[in-house]
Image (cartoon, grey):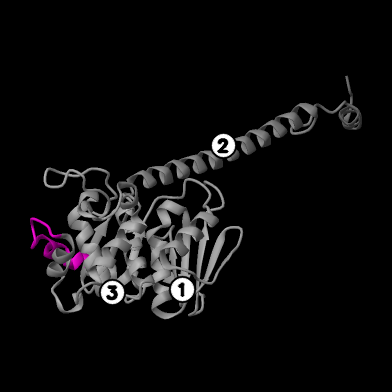
């Protein structure tokens, strides 16, 4: 036992120090485990957020009802993508034949009345052998059933008949009736506003007047097939193909006819954007937005794979 202060101090100074908190392998292991768990939790939060965002986008996609609209003035007319695609073909054939927008108006209004712009393979009691976009009848000299079921043939055949008289001077419903010889001669008038709106856009008379609201692409686009359909509808066009794009040299109304044909065909051909004359139709944004393309080129861009 120490006997004085010096001994006490000496005795304290020579005692072995106890363990120091916060040091040693065990504490370092604890700190490493906490850091690892923090990283795991952080990754989990991020992954969970990505999953939730992805699910939200998927749910938003399912809420989209694909459709196209054409507007002339304050009025908008709505079609589903199949109908819009057929309206685009009817208009393109009129453009190829050098016919005015009024001819396309008559053609579209007629097809809306006869088939609701669908290429149907059945008739009705009045015409059991009626077929196609215009419900033309083989028994009435319109062609074979196989020919009539080809939309390109049936549109050309309709315009061939329309050109036999002065359709420009007649009301739309009268011009349609002279071609179709329907039991309901005034019915075509009901569809004249719709026909005019789509014809004005799809012949290029009204720029950026057609818009389609679509879901995301489900596959890669087929550039070659789209190019073939485009030239079949419009005739020979200066077209250059890239891996995932088509560039068409076409100016003014012809350019806008091609551009809006592409928008109307975007659902079928997995097209994600169409640009012309400083405007861009963007599938993801469901609208026309400012773009950079010049006035004599239409650029059609395709999905390179399903998302």
* 192 falls in the magenta region: yes
Q: Distance between the residues labelled 2 and 1?
A: 45 Å
Nearer to us of marks 2 and 1 is: 1
User: Which region shows up in magenta?
Assistant: 181-195
- Look at the numbered discs 3 and 2 and tell me whether their residues touch, using CB distance below 8 Å: no
Residue 170 found in image quarter: bottom left
- Asked whether residue 214 appears in the rendered view, the answer is yes
| Tag 2 residue | 44
Question: Which one is in front, 132 or 163?
Answer: 163
Work out whether 5 lies above or below 78: above
Q: Whole-percent x and y of residue 149? A: 32, 49
Q: Identify the residue under disc 1.
A: 276
Cα distance in 3D space between marks 3 and 2? 59 Å
- Tell me: residue 129, above or below residue 102: above
Q: Is 108 contained in the magenta span?
A: no
The residue drawn where x is 42% and y is 52% is: 268
Identified at 42% across, 57% down, the residue is: 266
Side (left or right) of 7 relative to 88: right
In primary-sequence order, the first of circles 2 and 1 is 2
Closer to the camera, 275 or 269? 269
x, y percentage for residue 60?
37, 47
Q: Mark 3 points at which residue?
A: 101
Secondary structure of residue under mark 3: helix
Q: Which of marks 1 and 3 is nearer the N terminus?
A: 3
Which residue is found at the position 56% from the left and 36% from the top?
44
Q: Bin the neighbour count of mark 2 within 10 Å (Cα to Cα): few under 14, some 14-19, many 20 and up.
A: few
Residue 71 can be seen, yes or no: no
Image quadrant occupied by the N terminus: top right
* Predominant SS along the magenta part: helix
Q: Looking at the rendering, which quadrant does residue 6 occupy? A: top right
């Amino acid at each position: 036992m120490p006997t004085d202060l010096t001994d006490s101090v000496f005795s304290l100074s020579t005692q072995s120090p106890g363990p120091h908190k916060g040091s040693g392998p065990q504490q370092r292991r604890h700190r490493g485990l906490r850091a690892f768990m923090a990283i795991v939790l952080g990754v989990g939060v991020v992954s969970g957020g990505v999953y939730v965002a992805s699910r939200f986008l998927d749910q938003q996609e399912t809420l989209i009802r694909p459709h196209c609209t054409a507007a002339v003035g304050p009025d908008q007319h709505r079609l589903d993508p199949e109908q819009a695609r057929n309206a685009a073909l009817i208009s393109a054939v009129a453009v190829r034949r050098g016919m005015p927008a009024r001819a396309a108006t008559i053609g579209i209004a007629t097809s809306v009345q006869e088939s609701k712009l669908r290429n149907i393979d059945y008739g009705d009691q009045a015409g059991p052998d009626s077929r196609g976009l215009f419900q033309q009848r083989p028994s009435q000299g319109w062609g074979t059933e196989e020919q009539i079921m080809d939309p390109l043939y049936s549109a050309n055949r309709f315009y061939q008949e329309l050109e036999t008289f002065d359709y420009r001077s007649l009301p739309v419903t009268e011009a349609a009736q002279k071609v179709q010889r329907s039991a309901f001669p005034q019915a075509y008038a009901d569809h004249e506003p719709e026909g005019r709106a789509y014809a004005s856009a799809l012949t290029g008379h009204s720029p950026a007047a057609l818009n389609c609201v679509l879901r995301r692409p489900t596959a890669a686009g087929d550039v070659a097939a789209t190019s073939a359909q485009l030239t079949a509808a419009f005739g020979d066009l200066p077209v250059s193909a890239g891996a995932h794009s088509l560039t068409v040299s076409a100016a003014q109304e012809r350019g806008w006819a091609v551009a809006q044909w592409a928008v109307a065909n975007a659902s079928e051909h997995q097209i994600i954007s169409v640009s012309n004359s400083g405007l861009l139709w963007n599938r993801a944004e469901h609208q026309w937005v400012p773009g950079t393309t010049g006035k004599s080129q239409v650029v059609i861009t395709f999905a390179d794979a399903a998302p």
